[in-house]
């Protein structure tokens, strides 16, 4: 119903603008999730060092490939890439950062923006990574080598199962943009305690650490990445547990004590 003095055409144009904004937000959120669905398998290929055993269609892996020859310079570049990855994932996940970010864009797009930023730093790490092909270890015994690859695959399965246990649509910001598009009030997120979270407090972190460390061929560059991501996980875990304690209180402390 139009208010007195308000042209019906003006109200119609406003409604059309709001609808276009919701459609753009939906596309924005789905694009971030779609890109991440491509980039994380690519990261798995990057860690698996696929170019060593196949045609080197990937310019560089975590272990070998084209890059800076000076190991000191290569290490400095790699350290900067790891730091960018860790800072983006940690800082943008903190409640204080989220509150400031939501003042600049609709709250429903906050998680989707996080996903886009995560895609950017992950792609930068893959594309700009400088291999340091100084061998740290090599497993040649077939059974041990197969065990390494089995642990590597298990790590990725745990990572995926952890994301599904958390709620992958929420994790990638899809649920949030769908609620916004459909003009539904978003529900508050409950503490995740189902599936893998019944046994592990941080299943996705466990999966990542297995993926970066389980390899039959470890170079200095790969080890730098593994150590860097391990430090990131240890730091991020502390901040995340502090935030969960503040948000869920005794419910979280009881669940944590049982894990």
Image: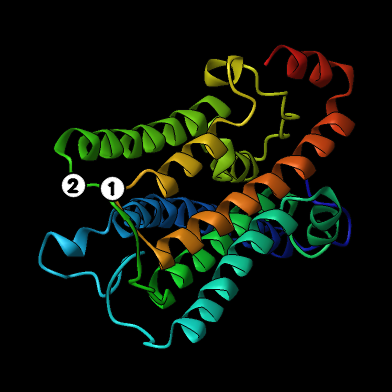
Q: Is residue 127 left or right of residue 77?
A: left
Residue 19 in view, yes or no:
no
Displayed quadrant of residue 87: bottom right
The percent coordinates of residue 100 (x first, y second) are 85, 60
Q: Which residue sits at x=67%, y=40%?
A: 183
The percent coordinates of residue 242 (x first, y second) are 84, 37
Q: How is the image coloured?
A: rainbow
Which residue lies under the disc numbered 1?
A: 216
> How crowded is the residue under tag 1: few (<14 C-alpha within 10 Å), some, or many (20+)?
some
> How crowded is the residue under tag 2: few (<14 C-alpha within 10 Å), some, or many (20+)?
few
Helix, strand or loop under label 1? loop
Marks 1 and 2, how far apart at CA: 8 Å
The percent coordinates of residue 107 (x first, y second) are 74, 51
Q: Which residue ends up furthest to the left in the rendered image?
A: 55
Dot 1 and dot 2 residues touching (CB under 8 Å):
yes
Q: Nearer the viewer, residue 155 or 140?
A: 140
Q: Nearer the viewer, residue 90 or 9?
A: 90
Which residue lies under the disc numbered 2?
A: 140
In the picture, the disc for residue 184 is none
Q: Nearer the viewer, residue 23 or 98?
A: 98
Q: Which residue sits at x=53%, y=67%?
A: 121
Helix, strand or loop under label 2? loop
The percent coordinates of residue 123 (x first, y second) are 44, 67
Q: Nearer the viewer, residue 34 or 95?
A: 95
Q: Which residue sits at x=64%, y=26%?
A: 201
Displayed quadrant of residue 202: top right
Quarter of the image with the N terminus in it: top right
């Amino acid at each position: 119903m139009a208010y007195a003095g308000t042209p019906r055409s003006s109200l119609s144009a406003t409604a059309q603008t709001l609808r276009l904004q919701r459609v753009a937000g939906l596309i924005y959120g789905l694009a971030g999730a779609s890109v991440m669905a491509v980039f994380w398998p690519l990261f798995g290929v990057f860690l698996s060092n696929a170019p060593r055993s196949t045609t080197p269609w990937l310019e560089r892996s975590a272990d070998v490939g084209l890059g800076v020859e000076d190991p000191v310079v290569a290490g400095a570049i790699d350290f900067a890439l790891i730091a960018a990855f860790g800072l983006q994932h940690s800082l943008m996940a903190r409640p204080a950062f989220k509150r400031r970010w939501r003042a600049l864009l609709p709250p429903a797009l906050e998680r989707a923006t996080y996903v886009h930023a995560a895609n950017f730093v992950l792609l930068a790490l893959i594309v700009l990574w400088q291999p340091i092909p100084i061998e740290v270890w090599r497993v040649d015994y077939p059974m041990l080598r197969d065990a390494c690859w089995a642990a590597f695959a298990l790590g990725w399965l745990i990572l995926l199962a952890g994301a599904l246990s958390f709620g992958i649509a929420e994790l990638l910001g899809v649920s949030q943009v769908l609620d916004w598009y459909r003009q539904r009030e978003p529900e508050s997120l409950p503490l995740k305690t189902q599936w893998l979270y019944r046994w592990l407090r941080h299943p996705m972190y466990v999966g990542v650490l297995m993926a970066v460390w389980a390899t039959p061929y470890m170079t200095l560059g790969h080890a730098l990445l593994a150590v860097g991501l391990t430090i990131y996980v240890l730091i991020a875990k502390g901040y995340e547990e502090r935030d969960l304690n503040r948000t869920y209180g005794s419910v979280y402390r009881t669940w944590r004590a049982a894990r």
